[in-house]
Image (cartoon, helix red, strand yellow):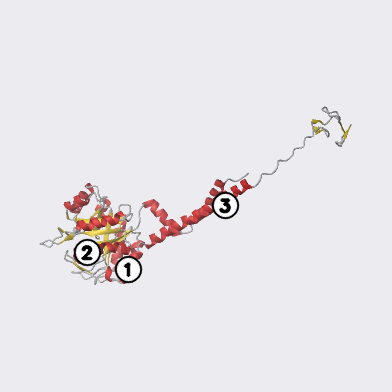
Amino acid sequence: MKTSGLSVLLIFLLFVGMPLAYASPIAFMHIYHYSQQATVTLNLTWFECGLLYKYGIDNFIAVLEQFHFNGVMIQPFMLDAEGQQTVIYENLSVLCNQVDLYADNHFGFKKFLFVGGCSYIDKTLVNAFADRDYVLCVDDGTTDLNTLRTVLQYLKNQNVETLLVHGFHPSYKTVIEEGLVDYSSPCFYPFWPNGDWIQYTFEFTYMRSWSKGKCKFVPGIQVFGGTPVRWLFPNSTQVDEMAEFLQELDSDGVMWFLPHSGESLRGEWFEGFLEHPEIHICIQGAPSNVGISILLIMFGILLMSVLIISIFLFLKLKEIKVKIEPPAPPEKQIDEKHKACMNCGKKFLSIRTFCPYCLTYNDQDGVKKV
């Protein structure tokens, strides 16, 4: 029985192609991860609009390109005369337009915008950005459950995704369990004089359990110094420890505080990671596993494609060769019932000795006699 070209390809895929899928366990795990969650690990940075006066919008956008971030979290507020975060930076609209343009050219880029805190909300911002594919965020500042629930419920009523920056308090756990939060973002900044690494790891492990099956867990790594509390800017080893710990928690991403340095119009002094090149490899390396896995997947697909095409061409060439070769002459079949006359060539029954057509005598050896 002959094997068709399609059968050969199917046999190849079963016995050769399938093992290739297991050639890279990392690639396979990421394929499974994407098929189950349809998400990519987020690697965000924080844009402090209160520092735009010093750096400008082009410098902000360049950070996204330089570090290959696939998302950004924008803090638009300045301080009013009473020292409250209620004044919106005048160039926010221009910045967001540039972020929108960047997102349009980078598939899967996520945009986050603060529209208030746990105890207040700027409805003008909500109305302006509810239909612009932004995740609307609120910062911590209150642990009053009713107030917090009211703010988040208002946002959910606008049919938007929400992000909550929060700490370790039961009120935050409650609103997450109630489905009012799409992204949980606790802040991770243990490097200050009285910081307790063991306590932080305990709290973050517990907060991670809140979001399981409820929302995405995208904690923020606070790599900056500031006032009134002076954080100690971590070295690369300490940043690696934080990133590895969050990876062990199976975080859905990480948000990095923040690229730029100086006194913000929000009234805080920041020390950004642009001035600390020793940790840049940590920041850029955060999504590297995803990138490597994608490359491995693409390489595996390419390898399989080359092998399949090679076999297909081989089979096609073989078919062409068979068609070009001259057909074998047909086999002559022996007719034992008839014999041909040695004189006229006509066939007659072999039991006759005389040809019925020319009356020539044909003996048993085929010799004619007259």
Task: Judge whether residue 208 can be spotted in this image.
Answer: yes
Disc ID at residue 56: 2
Instruction: Quickly name the residue at label 1.
Output: 280
Q: Is residue 49 left or right of residue 247?
A: left
| Element type at mark 1 | helix
Find out whether the residues at labels 3 and 1 contact each other: C-beta distance under 8 Å. Answer: no
| Element type at mark 3 | helix
Q: How many marks?
A: 3
Find out whether the residues at labels 1 and 2 contact each other: C-beta distance under 8 Å. Answer: no
Q: CA distance from mark 3 to mark 2?
A: 60 Å
Q: Quadrant of the N terminus?
A: top right
Q: Count neighbours of disc 3 (C-alpha within 10 A) and say few if under 14, some if 14 to 19, many if 20 or more.
A: few
Q: CA distance from mark 3 to mark 1?
A: 50 Å
Residue 275 at x, y percent in the picture: 27, 71
* Residue drawn at 29 percent across, 55 percent down: 103
**Residue type (three-letter) at the residue carrying disc 3:** Phe
Instruction: Quickly name the residue at label 3.
Output: 314
**Residue type (three-letter) at the residue carrying disc 2:** Gly
Q: Earlier in the sequence, mark 3 or mark 2?
A: 2
Q: Earlier in the sequence, mark 3 or mark 1?
A: 1
Q: Quadrant of residue 100?
A: bottom left
Task: Judge whether residue 240 can be spotted in this image.
Answer: no
